[in-house]
Image (cartoon, rainbow, N blue to C red):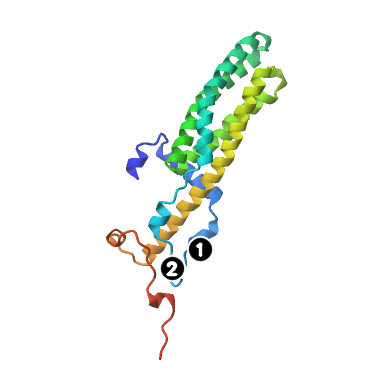
């Protein structure tokens, strides 16, 4: 945990806030009163193997493909937008000149951080980074891009309309894919947490899992069904 946290760009307090945000958004509060999917309580049937839960692949291939193509396309968008902004700059009102330059700079700066968090959160299956990617996409990039496309005072040129529309398509697809991936990762983390809590409640010793190896364990027979007198 500490070694992985050392390689993340997010401060610890921000990481905890993003984990809490994703947990409150995707995890059913009723799960704290029941065992994870596929598992029953101490008096129930067989439970899933913890290593199987830990090594299940959660990274989203569609999201990773869109992030890759977005990273390749973004320099083209920057070049086209910079050229169009230079051409129409003297035709804009004074306050719109300031707004467009500020919007362009914010999009330019945030996009690099957004793509980095998306890559790290998806490939390394980190919930805080993926939640940060989703928030940056939805709260900053999407409103600014819609402003460039819909405001009539911006004087959107045909080339700008084309490049903005393609970037908006990437953004909407990434938001959808990141939402689904974050939901899966959050539920998986919750399942692992409740499984560990169930094992601790069943008095599993700290070194027992390491000694027994990666194999599924079933509750003892007396825990599955009540004893009968003959």
Instruction: Look at 57% across and 30% down and name the residue there.
Output: 140
Q: Viewer-proximal residue, 100 or 211?
A: 211
**Eyeballing the image, is 121 above or below 99?**
below
Quadrant of the snapshot with the N terminus: top left
Residue 44 x %, y %: 46, 71
Q: Quadrant of residue 170?
A: top right
Mark in the foreground, 2 or 1: 2
Identify the residue under disc 2: 46
Left-right relation of 136 to 46: right
Can residue 17 be seen here? The reply is: no
Count how many numbered circles sit on residues in the image: 2
Q: Quadrant of residue 101?
A: top right
Of the numbered discs 2 and 1, the one sitting upstream in the chain is 1
Can residue 122 be seen here? The reply is: yes
Quick one: label 1, few (<14), some, or many (20+) residues within 10 Å? few
Instruction: Look at 52% across and 45% down and name the residue there.
Output: 181
Identify the residue under disc 1: 33
Residue 79 x %, y %: 55, 17
Left-right relation of 55 to 160: left
Q: Quadrant of residue 215?
A: bottom left
Left-right relation of 219 to 140: left
Residue 111 x %, y %: 52, 27
Residue 205 x %, y %: 30, 63
Q: Are marks 2 and 1 in contact (CB under 8 Å)?
A: no
Q: Viewer-proximal residue, 144 or 164?
A: 164
Quadrant of the snapshot with the C terminus: bottom left
Quick one: label 2, few (<14), some, or many (20+) residues within 10 Å? some
């Amino acid at each position: 945990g500490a070694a992985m946290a050392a390689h993340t760009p997010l401060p610890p307090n921000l990481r905890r806030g993003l984990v809490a945000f994703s947990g409150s958004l995707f995890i059913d509060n009723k799960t704290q009163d029941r065992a994870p999917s596929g598992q029953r309580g101490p008096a129930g049937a067989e439970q899933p193997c913890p290593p199987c839960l830990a090594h299940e692949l959660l990274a989203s291939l569609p999201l990773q493909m869109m992030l890759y193509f977005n990273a390749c396309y973004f320099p083209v968008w920057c070049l086209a937008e910079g050229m169009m902004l230079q051409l129409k700059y003297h035709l804009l009102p004074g306050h719109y000149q300031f707004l467009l330059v500020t919007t362009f700079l914010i999009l330019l700066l945030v996009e690099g951080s957004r793509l980095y968090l998306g890559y790290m959160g998806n490939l390394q299956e980190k919930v805080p980074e993926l939640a940060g990617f989703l928030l940056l996409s939805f709260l900053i990039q999407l409103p600014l891009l819609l402003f460039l496309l819909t405001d009539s005072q911006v004087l959107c040129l045909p080339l700008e309309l084309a490049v903005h529309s393609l970037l908006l398509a990437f953004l909407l697809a990434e938001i959808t894919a990141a939402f689904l991936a974050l939901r899966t990762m959050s539920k998986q983390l919750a399942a692992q947490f409740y499984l560990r809590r169930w094992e601790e409640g069943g008095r599993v010793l700290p070194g027992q899992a390491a000694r027994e190896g990666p194999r599924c364990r079933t509750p003892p027979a007396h825990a599955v069904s009540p004893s009968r007198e003959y």
